[in-house]
Amino acid sequence: MSTGTHSYYFKSAGKNPSLVLNADYRPLSYLPLSIWSWKDTIKGVFMDRISVVAEYDKYVNSPSMKIKIPSVVVLKEYIKPVRSNAFTRFNLFLRDEFRCQYCGSKDDLTFDHVLPRAQGGKTTWENVVAACSNCNLKKGSKSLKKSRLKLLKKPVRPSTEELLNKGRKFPPNYLHDSWTDFLYWDAELLS
């Protein structure tokens, strides 16, 4: 994964996506960031399911009206957030901050079993790390000692809160100016 790590979230939303906030004015999710296409957003407005908080300086025209495209919307009914730290490739990369846990590279990431499966290693949070292709090939099915590689940090199961906080460090490639206040207002301030 290179610099375009999060761009794939926005392809389905097309141009002028809307940031979707829960009724408490927090994003439904950070990773992937909760966005809708402008078409889904306009539909939500007409169905009276969302309120518009901010708009683009662009319009959509129909035969009978001209509508400003919403850039930030809030749901009228609160949806309980999903609290899950599922063991997925994306969450693994997020835990490891999109860096190889052997050399620190951010390029061409895959994953590696610290204790190889051929030696009884399991596919768990505690045994799998993000690894660049070069380090993964170098290590192969050898132990850390035999491969002469060292882990930057010990792999552990992250809490949901840890994943959420790490997710805030990796903003998507597209952030409209009107979104910024809603993405970071609940982040802990550093002293």
Image (cartoon, rainbow, N blue to C red):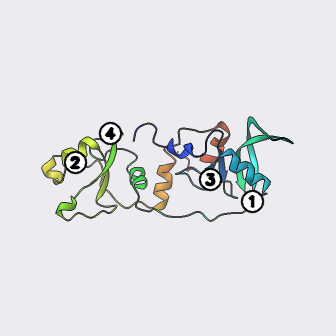
Q: Which dot marks residue 27?
A: 3
Label 4 environment density (alpha carbons within 10 Å; few <14, some 14–19, many ≥20): some
Query: Dot 2 lies on which element?
Result: loop
Rendered-image quadrant of the N terminus: top left
Q: Is residue 34 left or right of residue 51?
A: left
Give the image location of residue 66, x and y in percent: 83, 39
Sequence order check, earlier mark of 1 and 3: 3
Question: Mark 1–mark 3 contact, CB under 8 Å?
Answer: no
Task: Tell me the residue that label 2 is attached to.
Answer: 150
> Splitting the image into 4 quarters, where does residue 68 fall?
top right
Which of the marked residues, 4 or 1, is nearer the chain's N terminus? 1
- The reply to whether the C-beta atoms of the residues labelled 4 and 2 are less than 8 Å apart is no
Residue 163 is situated, as x and y percent measured from the top left of the image, at 46, 55
Q: Decide if residue 99 is on the left or right side of residue 119.
A: right
Task: Residue under label 4, please give it.
Answer: 105
**Mark 4 or 2: the one toward you:** 4
Between 49 and 158, the one nearer to me in the picture: 49
Q: CA distance from mark 3 to mark 4?
A: 30 Å
Q: Residue at x 16, y 46 (%)?
A: 148
Q: CA distance from mark 4 to mark 2?
A: 14 Å
Q: Residue furthest front?
A: 63
Q: Amino acid at mark 4?
A: Ser
In the rendered structure, are the residues bearing label 1 and label 2 in contact, judged by CB atoms less than 8 Å apart?
Answer: no
Q: Distance from label 1 to label 3 (Cα)?
A: 13 Å
